[in-house]
């Protein structure tokens, strides 16, 4: 089970209930969905479960006018100071490339549900939300929130006006995308193959206003210690499973590749898995099993395609593994036999 800072719950309800009648009563009702006291002091280190947060976003999208746009409104309201030490590390980095690298490395200090991959190419810099194998509206909205917030924080810290080259969103284009256009101020590609923000290298390398090498090093060390103290076993397992699931179509990733995606060394990941009583190969098997079940239930892909997408060399090897997991063949599982 993943987690997210309670800061985002407050921001979601502030955005959703602004100007609404009887907002106090509705706010209390929605806070009960995440099992949290609405009157408690806002502490970025306090967490709520990802499932509860997704459910909250889905309830807002369903019951509140304009609720589907709430992630963009939320993202526009975020400030570095909302994130505690993580926000200060973002702010004190030398440039946006450095800020984004800190998001990639330390983002799990504030949430486990929007991990990022930062890539510099010849034509620009991309910051992409690493996709989870399990799709639902709340997760889609959370990914949009992550990109909208990244855009807002970028404009807060950079010494120059930040206009991205493009934004890619996996969601379908809404009937009215005015809010999206106004916030990002660039071409938006809906129904894309990824959720990502793209910048020109010149923009990414422009100095941050409060860049400070000493402060940046201090906060990196502080966040590194916070990462080391994260000991929620299901959270670590879930993050590793997400990394494996995202890579399976290109073959089973090595432990080193997964560790790099999580912003830690192979040795650190191996130690933490061992401390939690987890074996990497067992997690590979679980990721394959979960993804194959989803593909069999939710798609009409041929079994050979599913074998490829789950990292098997051929259909027969996949079928034998699936039968070990379930005691029946993939075809029988799909039919419900």
Image (cartoon, rainbow, N blue to C red):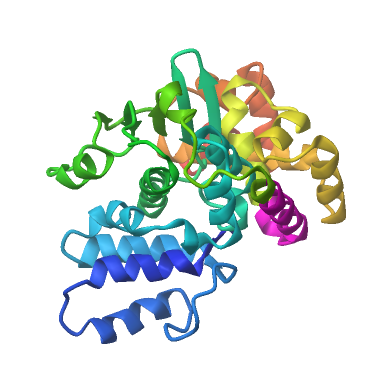
Q: Vertical placement of 13 versus 139: above or below?
A: below
Left or right: where does residue 126 sit relative to residue 289? left
Residue in the picture at 37% in, 36% down:
160
- Is 58 placed left or right of 317 in the picture? left
* Main SS, magenta residues: helix
Foreground of the two, 273 or 156: 156
* Percent coordinates x, y for residue 225 in the rendering: 76, 56
Q: Which percent across, then down, holds residue 61?
A: 26, 60
**Count of numbered circles in the view:** 0
Is residue 331 within the magenta segment? no
In terms of image quadrants, where is residue 298? Answer: top left
Q: What are the residue bounds of the magenta stretch?
A: 217-236
Q: Residue 93's spot in the image, x, y percent?
A: 58, 42
Closer to the camera in the image, 304 or 23: 23
Within the image, what quadrant is residue 154 found in? top left
Residue at 36%, 48% (x, y): give it: 152
Residue positioned 57% across, 20% down in the render:
308
């Amino acid at each position: 089970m993943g987690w997210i800072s309670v800061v985002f719950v407050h921001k979601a309800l502030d955005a959703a209930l602004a100007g609404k009648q009887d907002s106090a009563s509705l706010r209390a009702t929605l806070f009960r969905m995440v099992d949290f006291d609405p009157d408690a002091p806002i502490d970025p280190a306090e967490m709520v479960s990802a499932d509860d947060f997704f459910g909250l976003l889905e309830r807002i999208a369903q019951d509140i006018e304009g609720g589907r746009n709430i992630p963009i409104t939320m993202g526009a309201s975020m400030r570095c100071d909302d994130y505690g030490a993580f926000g200060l590390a973002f702010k004190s980095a030398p440039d946006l490339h450095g800020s984004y690298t800190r998001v990639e490395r330390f983002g799990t200090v504030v949430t486990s549900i929007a991990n990022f991959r930062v890539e510099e190419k010849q034509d620009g810099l991309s910051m992409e939300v690493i996709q989870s194998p399990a799709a639902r509206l709340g997760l889609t909205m959370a990914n949009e929130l992550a990109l909208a917030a990244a855009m807002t924080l970028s404009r807060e810290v950079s010494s120059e006006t930040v206009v991205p080259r493009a934004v890619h969103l996996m969601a379908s284009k809404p009937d009215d995308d005015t809010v999206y256009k106004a916030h990002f101020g660039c071409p938006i590609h809906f129904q894309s193959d990824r959720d990502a923000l793209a910048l020109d290298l010149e923009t990414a390398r422009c100095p941050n206003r409060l860049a400070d090498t000493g402060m940046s090093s201090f906060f990196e060390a502080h966040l590194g210690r916070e990462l080391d103290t994260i000991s929620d076993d299901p959270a670590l397992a879930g993050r590793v499973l997400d990394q494996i699931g995202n890579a399976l179509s290109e073959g089973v990733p090595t432990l080193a590749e997964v560790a790099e995606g999580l912003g830690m060394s192979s040795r650190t990941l191996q130690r933490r898995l061992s401390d939690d009583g987890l074996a990497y190969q067992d997690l590979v098997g679980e990721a394959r099993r979960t993804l194959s079940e989803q593909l069999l239930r939710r798609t009409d892909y041929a079994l050979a395609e599913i074998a490829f997408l789950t990292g098997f060399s051929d259909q027969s090897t996949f079928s034998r593994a699936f039968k070990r997991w379930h005691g029946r063949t993939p075809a029988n599982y799909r039919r419900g036999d």
